[in-house]
Amino acid sequence: MSENEFFSKEPMLELFVFEAVQLIEQLEELLIEVEKNEAFDSNCVNDVFRIMHTIKGSSAMMMYNNLTTLSHSIEDLFGYIRENNDANYNCGKIVDIVLRAVDFIKDQISKIQAGENAEDEATDLIKEIKGYLSEISNKPKEVIQAKIDTSKFDISSNDVVETPEGLRKYKVKIMFQDGCMMENIRAFSVVHTLKELVFDIYFEPQDIIENESTSDLIRENGFIIYFSTNKTEETIQTCINQAFFLESFLLEEILEFPDKYTVTKKIVEKEAEAEVAAVAVDIIDVDKEVELQKQHLLGLSNSLVNDKESKQVATKQQNLINVNLTKLDMLMDLVGEIVISEAMVTKNPDLDGLQLDNFTKAARQLRKLTNELQDIVMSIRMLPIAATFHKMNRIVRDMSKKLDKDVELVLIGEETEVDKNIIDNISDPLMHLIRNAIDHGIESKEQRLKSGKPGKSSIILEAKNSGGDVWITVKDDGNGLDKQRIMEKAKQKMLLTKPENEYSDSEIFSFILLPGFSTNEKVSEYSGRGVGMDVVRENIEKIRGSINIDSIDKVGTRISIKIPLTLAIIAGMMVKVGREKYIIPITSIRQSFKPKADQIIVDHEGNELIMIRGQCFCIVRIHNKFHLDTQVTNIEDGILVVIDDGTNLVCLFADELVGEQQVVVKPVPYYIRKVKGLGGCTIQVDGSISLIIDVNGLLARG
C-alpha cells in the first residue's frame, strides 16, 4: 500500500503524523539554538515541556506507547527543570539526550508514514533520562518511574469513574471554522485533551470516530460536551483553546446532565485510585500549564465575554488551512490542461483569416484569467526554503562534534520561495554537500590556525531569486579543491576530450560530478568531496537544475545550484528540426544567431566549433543527436542557439526558430524515456506533441 493510500484510509493518523513532524522540527531547531547559547532560558524550557506534553498526549491517543513513554520521560525532566530554577544540570548533556530522542521519534514517524510496524522500544534512552533526572533531583529512580495508563486515553461516552462530591458540571458547545475538514477528528482531539482535567464526560454526536458522517453534523450543529470537574473555568477555557481551527465555543455551568446520561458510579480500588491520581498529577500541573499556554497559543484570543450564566470565548480567525499535496498536484494538472485547451481554442487553424472581433476580445479576457489562475495555483505550491535550510543545522552540529571541528552554519535568504516538489528534491543534495564541506573541505582547528585562519570555520548556505530561477549556494572557507590533483585523476580515467590547457577551472572542477570520481585516498563514514557527487548532480538534474563549482586552493569552495521556480509550466523557445519541433527552456538560452560558413572550425576528430567574440564553442546538431531527417544541413541555412548548462556554453544547430511560448511540462512517454537529453514533452495547440530538451542531459559527459 502506498503512503498516500495508507493515509487516505487513516485521516486521524495523517493528522497525528503532520502535527508530530511539525513539533519535532520546532524542537530540533530549539535545541540547536540552546546549545549555541549554552543555556536553557525559561521560555526554552517551557517550549520543550509543551512540545513533549503535546506529543505524549497525541501518541497516547493513537496508542503508540513507545512514543508516549519516551516523551513522558522528557516531559518529567523539563518539568523538574522548570520548577527548580536552581537545578544543577549539564545543558550539553540534556541536548544530546533529547536529540537522540528526537531521532528515535523521527524514525518511528517514518515507519508510521510507510505503513510499517512502529513499536521499537526506547528502554535504554528512557532509563538514561530517568537516571539523569534522579541525578539532578537527588531522588531515587523508583520515585520518578511513573507509568502512563494508556487506557485513560480510550475515549468513550460510556466511560465512568468514581466522581468526587462537590464537582461543578459544565456544558460546552464548540464550533469549528468553515472548511477545516475532519471535524470529527478535531472533536475527538478536544475530548482527549479535556479528559485529563475532568471526571464524567459525554459528548454529542457520540460515534465521532466510528461514523465519518458525524463531521457534517458537527459542521452544522456544533460539537457539545458535558463534563464535571474541579478545575477553574479559566483552565478549561485554555484547554479548549488548544484545538486547531477553532471558530468559537460557549462554556456554561449547568445543574445536571441531560437525563439520557445516567451516571453509574463504578467503585475503584484504593490502589488503582491512587495510581490514577498520581498519573493525573504527573501528566499536567494545571495552574502552571495555564500560564504556559497563555504565552504560546498563537492565533487564539483570550478575551472573555462575561455573562451571568455563560461565558463565550471567540478565537481569532485563522487564515491558514492544511491541504493535501495530492490535491494540489491534481489542481496543477487541471490548470495545465486548461492552458493547453485555451491555446487550442484561441489559436485554432480554422480561425485563420477570419475577422472575429468579439471572439478576439473574449479570447484576450480568457487568456488574462487563465494566466491569473495559473499564477495563483503556482503560488499556492510555493513554500519558503527555510525548513529545508534549518535541517542542515542538525547535520552541522552532529558532524562538528564527531569530527572535532568548530563549524558555524550561516543561513541567508531562507525566506526564498520554491515549488513544493523542488523543496522535496533539494534536501538530500544539500545534505550531501554540507557533509562533504565539513568532512573534506574544512580543515581541523590546528591546520586552520597554522595557516593563519580563525579556528572557527563557516559554511554559508544562501538562496536567492534570479529571474525565473532560484540560486542556492553552498560556500565554505576550507581548504578548497586541488585543481591539479583533479586533472591528474581525469587523465588517469581518460576523461579529457581536448588539450589540457584548454580546460577552464570550472570545467576541471566539474569532473568531480562524474560517477566514481574521487581524489580522496580513503572513504570515511561521511561522503567525501567527489564521492557520490554524481548522485547530487542527478538529483539536481531531475528537477531541471544545474550545478556549478568554483574553488580557490587554501581559500574555500563555492557550489552554486540553479533550479527553476516551478516544474509544471515553463517558458520555452520552440525550434524546428525537420518535421519535428523541440522546446528549449528560455532560462538556458544565452543568444541565437545565423552563422556564416567561414566562422566554422572543424578539428581533427570532425567536431564542429565556432569562434564567438574570441571564445570557441562546440556545435551540436540536433538532427544528428536525435537521428532526424532534415533538408537543412548547410550551416548557413540554419540557426545556432547558444545554451548554458551551468558549466559549458554550447551551440545547438536547428532549422529555424518558431517562437517563444509558455508550455505545460508532461512526463516523457516510457518508450523514449531512455533517450538522453529529453526532459519532458508538451502538447501543442494542434494536438501534436513537442519534446522538451534537457540541456544538462544533452551536454552531460558519458
Image: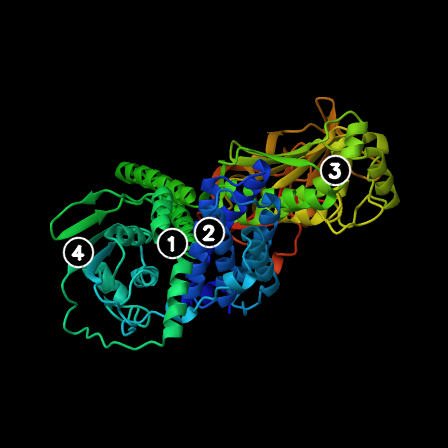
Give the x, y percent position of residue 625: 69, 47
Of residue 88 and residue 474, the one placed in the foreground of this image is: 88
* Residue hosting label 2: 79
Name above or below for residue 207 compared with residue 357: below
* Mark 3 or 4, nearer chain start: 4
Q: Is residue 685 left or right of residue 36?
A: left
Give the x, y percent position of residue 559: 67, 36
Q: Is residue 89 left or right of residue 237?
A: right
Name above or below for residue 426 compared with residue 669: above
Of tags 2 and 4, the one toward the viewer is: 2
**Which colour scheme appears in the figure?**
rainbow
Q: Which mark is residue 441?
A: 3
Q: Is residue 360 left or right of residue 543?
A: left
* Residue found at x 66% / y 49%: 538
Q: Which mark is residue 252?
A: 4
Q: Which amino acid, mark 2? A: Gly
* Mark 1 or 4, nearer chain start: 4
- Disc 3 versus disc 4: distance between alpha carbons? 65 Å
Of tags 3 and 4, the one toward the viewer is: 4
* Residue hosting label 1: 285
- Disc 1 versus disc 2: distance between alpha carbons? 9 Å
- Disc 2 versus disc 4: distance between alpha carbons? 32 Å
* Mark 2 or 3, nearer chain start: 2
| Few, some or many residues within 10 Å of mark 3 (<14, 14–19, 20+) | many
* Mark 1 or 3, nearer chain start: 1
Give the x, y percent position of residue 330: 42, 55
Q: Which amino acid, mark 3? A: Gly
Find out whether the residues at labels 1 and 2 contact each other: C-beta distance under 8 Å.
yes
Q: Is residue 470 left or right of residue 197?
A: right
Q: Which mark is residue 273?
A: none
Q: Which amino acid, mark 4? A: Glu
Q: Is residue 358 visible?
A: yes
